[in-house]
Image (cartoon, rainbow, N blue to C red):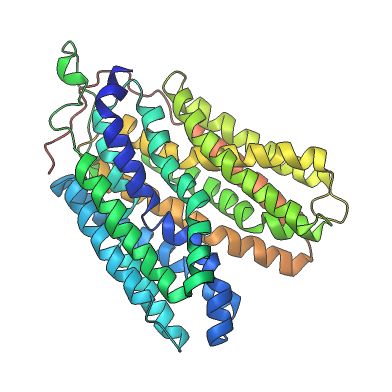
Amino acid sequence: MEEFRKGWRLVLAAATGVGLGITGLTFYTLGIFIGPLSQEFGWSRTAISGATLLTTTTTILLGPVIGRLVDRLGGRRVGMVSLFLLALGLVGLSHIGPSLTSFYLAFGCAMVLGAGTLPIVWTRAVNASFDRSRGLALGLTLTGTGVCGILAPPFTQWLVTTHGWRVAYLGQAALVAGLGLAVVGLFFREATGTSAVAASAPAMPERPSLTLPEARRTRQFWGLGVGLLFASFAVASLIVHLVPMLSGAGVERATAVWYASLLGMAIIVGRLGVGGLVDRLHPPAVAAAVMAAAALGCALLALSGATMPGANAALVLPAVLLIGFAAGAEVDLVAFLVSRYFGLRSYGEIYGWQLGFFALGAGLGPMGIGRLYDMTGGYGAGLGACAAGFLVGAAALGTLGPVPKVAPAAVCPQAG
């Protein structure tokens, strides 16, 4: 509690930055714009939703670059500049049309300008200020996307309905520039030298802190990357295809959407729950258990009849909860495990690489499962692929080996 007494403002600011960034606000509200843009310009829904690949590409290509900037300049500078630039990018989106190319260019520019809002930026400072409660603090930080996923769609839909989609983009820009910059500017303060609590703690040996080249020579670096690649493949596939999967099995669309909302709530619970567990238990074992449970969730979906008419709701509910718990855990695990295994010296760069593995899996998953559906006419093969992805992820993450058990005094060079 001492760590949270000193650092709750930082967690609040970091959660705000994550929620209003490109993995939060723009991702969770893209669907709100599909109908209005399709109606006004005649663009297909597939073409509009393809903009998510621009977010994936930005994460893969710019994640390591942003990480290096954060390591050298600090998250506060990078985050505040990028929030302002993202707001400008959203203003640009309000002027698109009538060509689809203008949408892709504007959306891509917004993603590049907002790349400094990736979780890399915000989690580094949280890692530096929390040690004993690091997992829970990271979980609270990353619930920013979940809260945004709950609140941002109704806000955006209200703007679209009352004022039109162009004003909705301007409203989002005002939200990012107003609320985002205000909260981050007031409360986002980074610890320097040692963690905020470690400063008054008894001297203890420092945890190893590796450079990116040193980290890449470890099996943990590649094991973590492989685990994230396969786990994110499965998670993203199920998030995107859950509603059509259940609807195709005869579940009423309103009920299927309710299950999707339940999945979102389970993601928040997963982030907090896993964050608390890794502070107390062996983190690789926690990761393996969560991923194995999600594979069980895929099996329950298959047994429920979700791949054919007549789904059994009694099995769908626990399946959705298990999958949602894993979906909430994976992002937590990236930040936590990178900080524990590799330290904070080159945290941003290393996290950027791991986020690239994560984004690659998340980008390929929904398309791959969609392709399997087109080839087989059902989701049976897709569920099998997702279950296999979770099991590979469980094996890769569960065999990372012992986590260093030393000192809050991990190397954290002065930033910002």
Q: Quarter of the image holding residue 247?
A: bottom right
Q: Residue at x 47, y 84 (%)?
A: 100
- Depth check: give the residue in front, 305 or 365: 305
Give the image location of residue 354, x and y in percent.
Answer: 38, 47
Query: In front here: 229 or 84?
Result: 84
* Residue 261 showing in the rendered view: yes
Q: Residue at x 48, y 23 (%)?
A: 277
Horizontal side, residue 152 vs residue 309: left or right: left
* Quadrant where the C terminus is found in the figure: top left
Quadrant of the drawing holding the N terminus: top left
Determine the residue located farthest toward the right in the rendered image. Answer: 310
Relative to 327, is 250 on the left or the right? right
> Relative to the observer, which residue lies in front, 212 or 171?
171
Quadrant position of residue 186: top left
User: Viewed as shown, does residue 202 lie left or right of 272?
Assistant: left
**In front of the other: 245 or 344:** 245
**Residue at x-position 62% and y-position 34%:** 292
In the displayed structure, 268 sits above or below 133; it is below
Q: Is residue 392 visible?
A: no
Q: How many marks?
A: 0
Residue 411 spot, x, y in % from top left:
18, 30
Left or right? Give the position of 366 relative to 277.
Answer: right
